[in-house]
Amino acid sequence: MKGALVTPVIVMVVVYLLLKFVVPNIPGSAPLPFSVIILYMMLTLSGIGMFYTLSKDSKDAFWGPMERFLTGENIGGMQALRWGLLILFPLLVGWQTYSSTAVSDQPPGENRTIHPAPPGEYAGLSNPVAKTPDAIQQGKGFYAAYCSPCHGGNFDGKGPAARGFNPPPANFADPTTIAMLQESYLFWRIKKGGVGLPIEGMPWKSAMPRWEVELPDEWIWKIIMGEYDGAHQSPRTWE
Amino acid sequence: MKRGLNQILPSAIASVGLILGCLIVQPVFAEEKTPASAPPESASESNAVSASLVKGSLPTDDPTAAVWNTAAQARFPMSPQVHWPNRILDATVKDLNVRALHDGTNVSILLEYADPTEDADDAAAVEFMVGDKKAHFAHGQPMAQVEGGPVNIWFWRNKDAKGVDMNAMGFGTLKIQEHQDVQAKGVYSNGTWKVVFTRPLLTGHLEEDTQIEMGGFINIAFAVWDGKKDVSGGIKEKGSQKAVSSWWNFRAEAPPNYTGYYYAAIAVGLAFGFQFFLIRNLKKGHRA
């Protein structure tokens, strides 16, 4: 009779090992989050339950040992384990209840989108300033005067005025910032500043100035050229 | 022999499995959410101020009282105000230490920072959002795509020797309130300012004042001015030229709450009861 319980246990272990160690190594796959593994394990368990309750014989063979264990009849040395489980299970439920009702000491989480979608009128704008060495040089000069206090002389987001700001100023040398964006996106962000962000960008936290009130558009386009050149990045294009 | 078992056990085990599954999956999902606001750069920097609940009276007039040591110290980096003109590219104060206490009725917030000289125009301020609307940390200035709300600013200046309760909703809109609920006291010693602001947690002025409900997190930001006079007699930092912080979190600790223990005790009782009836019915099934 005990054999009826050995097979489900082996199935569960094999499925777990597959999910944990084999699936992540399939080309194009990635390690599964723990929650997904748990979900698959629950599905496997339901499947096993359904399989063993299909016929009366298999059901008896499957539930019989469990029933004997729970009622404690003729289980000999397993009595201690039975009492241990009967005490441990309610305690586990109590602990789970306590930890799910406990008030967190941590501030509420914030999911801030770093590069939210720009308003439609900015999509596809191209830089009207010819990309000449002079224009790039001029852009770098404007960058040094207006942008480098926060974004840094090395374009790394570590300017002397940056330390107090959360979110921190963008690091243009990081390949996940301006290298992933089009020039039109930078034009929008520089022109409208932090307060121009949509709600998912949390505009109330950004210290980025709204440069449209201080700088002409032409300077902003030159600053964009200077930024890409200085940070050794290229704008993203559709090609 | 298996009648009792066949009727009860499959559904019972399925229920227990589902409950355990939910209990396990739910916290796991919670863990995988993005962590709370950007982690501070170093361990010595904080993202929240927690006001401890004290039994006795608050040290509203004494920034040096020993009871302040019972409050956890939060430390925030400061930046020169570069967001809008007139800017400043280097401010005197680089870091701000903050502690807070409350007694269930009033809250006291202590700012502590290094300033090499004591000057009449030295000043400090605490800023909050008002109501449910988000407000930009720079004086609640309008946002293009989000309808913002006002900010509530508590201001102290050395030469005034008092707290001023103000509101703003955009640059040039700073206004002193009709209801003055804030008191403040500053003490300068050994190159350090200690300034304590005190106000009732709740004021009833919902449109002007931040309301501090115990246990809930609200936003808080800080500003500091070095009022030192330069050789020409001008003041180094005044108006928009100041050291500022970003929005951080503030919470007045709630009184101890034991409901979690009650719920846990009920859950333990239910689980024992479930086991008891399950096993009793199984044994009945055996005898049947």
Image (cartoon, coloured by chain):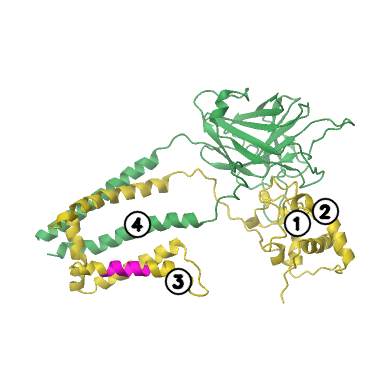
- The percent coordinates of residue A52 (x first, y second) are 25, 71
Same subunit, tags 2 and 1 = yes
Per the image, the residue denoted by label 2 is A144
Q: Amino acid at mark 1?
A: Phe
Per the image, the residue denoted by label 1 is A155
- The percent coordinates of residue A195 (x first, y second) are 72, 53
Quadrant in the rendering for residue A75: bottom left
Quadrant in the rendering for residue A42: bottom left
Q: Nearer the viewer, residue B166 or A192?
A: A192
Answer above or below: position of B221 versus A72. above
Left or right: residue B33 versus residue A48 is right
Q: Are marks 2 and 1 in contact (CB under 8 Å)?
A: no
Mark 2 or mark 4, whichever is nearer to me = 2
- The percent coordinates of residue B108 (x first, y second) are 60, 30
Chain B rendering hue: green
- The percent coordinates of residue B274 (x first, y second) are 25, 52
Q: Disc 1: which chain? A: A
How many angstroms separate mark 2 from mark 4 (CA)? 59 Å
* Colour yellow belongs to chain: A
- Dot 3 or dot 2: first in sequence order is 3
- Residue, x 67% and y 54% (percent of image)? B146
Q: Amino acid at mark 4?
A: Leu
Mark 2, residues whose alpha carbon is within 10 Å: few (<14), some, or many (≥20)? Answer: some
Q: Amino acid at mark 2?
A: Ala
How many angstroms separate mark 3 from mark 1 (CA)? 41 Å
What segment is highlighted magenta in the picture? A7-15
How many angstroms separate mark 1 from mark 4 (CA)? 51 Å
Tell whether position A95 is magenta.
Answer: no
